[in-house]
């Protein structure tokens, strides 16, 4: 049963976009090689918001990814660069990735805000506007899943 992780980040100012873009490429490259990564997608939303959807063999695989490499380097910067950040996880029986509608529904129902230094008024309550649901880019593992 895949372990699904959804994150939503909103960059608080255009001046942080170049640094964020560099780290986003590095973390994308890291996830494609990560043990236990099954697949996922990125969704560039409006107003500098980015959603990530990843599916894993298990929670331990996802934790190994977030605690190492480029992702570990990126996390402290995002605390300062973002004014909204949230995460939700679940295990599901089907291998197919959920829809973005389902990701948004679960984020609002069961997600939790992540720590940011400059939270927007929408941050704590996850009251962000509905995401754009088109234009997602798939993420596929570099090596076939075991």
Image (spheres, helix red, strand yellow):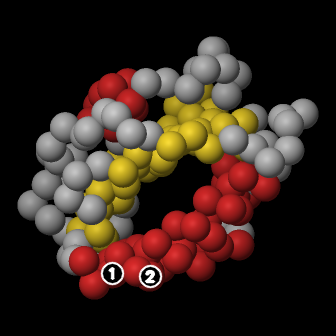
| Mark 1 nearby-residue class (10 Å; few <14, some 14–19, many ≥20) | some
Q: What x and y, as percent, mark residue 142?
A: 80, 48
* Residue 115 versus residue 8 in the image, above or below: below
Q: Which residue is mark 1?
A: 16
Q: Is residue 4 left or right of residue 20?
A: right
Q: What x and y, as percent, mark residue 129?
A: 15, 43
Q: Which residue is mark 2?
A: 19
Who is closer to the viewer here, 137 or 73? 137
Who is closer to the viewer here, 15 or 72? 15
* Residue 79 versus residue 128 in the image, above or below: below
Q: What x and y, as percent, mark residue 106?
A: 36, 30
Q: Is residue 41 visible to us here?
A: yes
Q: Are the residues flagged by discs 1 and 2 in contact, CB closer than 8 Å?
A: yes
Q: Is residue 58 visible to us here?
A: no
Q: Is residue 54 left or right of residue 43?
A: right
Q: Which quadrant does the C terminus fall into?
A: top right
């Amino acid at each position: 049963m895949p372990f699904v992780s959804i994150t939503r980040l909103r960059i608080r100012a255009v001046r942080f976009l170049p640094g964020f873009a560099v780290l986003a490429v590095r973390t994308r490259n890291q996830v494609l090689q990560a043990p236990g990564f099954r697949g996922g997608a990125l969704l560039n939303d409006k107003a500098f918001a980015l959603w990530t959807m990843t599916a894993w063999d298990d929670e331990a695989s996802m934790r190994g990814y977030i605690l190492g490499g480029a992702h570990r380097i990126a996390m402290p910067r995002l605390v300062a660069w973002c004014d909204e950040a949230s995460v939700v996880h679940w295990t599901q029986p089907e291998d197919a990735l959920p829809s973005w509608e389902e990701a948004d529904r679960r984020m609002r129902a069961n997600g939790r805000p992540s720590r940011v230094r400059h939270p927007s008024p929408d941050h704590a309550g996850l009251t962000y506007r509905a995401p754009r649901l088109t234009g997602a880019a798939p993420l596929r593992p570099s090596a076939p899943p075991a």
